[in-house]
Amino acid sequence: MEKEMEKELHYPSLYLEWEDDYELPESGTLTVTFKRRSETNRKDAKGKTSQSVELEILSIEDVEKGKVEKKSARKESEEAIDKLAKEAGDEDEDY
């Protein structure tokens, strides 16, 4: 009997670039306003699906400095991504 492989979690990353020092803390919570610029959905030969999304950050609304615990951050990230995916599916595509 083959050993079941654990599903490896993958969290998205966000790359920000600007000309001046924005003085972001080492860790914390960032609230932004964004617009989805593009979305790509892929399915490989084995049926594994993946998605990539490009976001235009319209504004940074709030930055809260603080240490983020990995366990709670992972759980919150999963929940936030699931919620956003559900909401995105319910909205009209006006982009």
Image: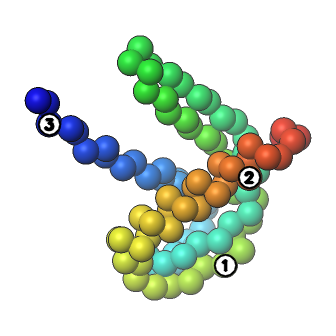
Q: Residue furthest front?
A: 1
Q: Nearer the viewer, mark 3 or mark 2?
A: 3
Which numbered circle lies on residue 19?
none
Q: Nearer the viewer, mark 3 or mark 1?
A: 3
Which numbered circle lies on residue 87?
2
Which numbered circle lies on residue 62?
1
Q: Earlier in the sequence, mark 3 or mark 1?
A: 3
Say if 75 sits above or below 57 in the image.
below
Amino acid at the residue labelled 1:
Asp
CA distance for labels 2 and 1? 22 Å
Q: Earlier in the sequence, mark 3 or mark 2?
A: 3
Res 17 seen here = no
CA distance for labels 3 and 2? 36 Å
Q: Which residue is mark 3?
A: 3
CA distance for labels 3 and 1? 45 Å
Residue 55 image point, x, y percent: 67, 48
Local SS, label 3: loop
Residue 92 image point, x, y percent: 87, 42
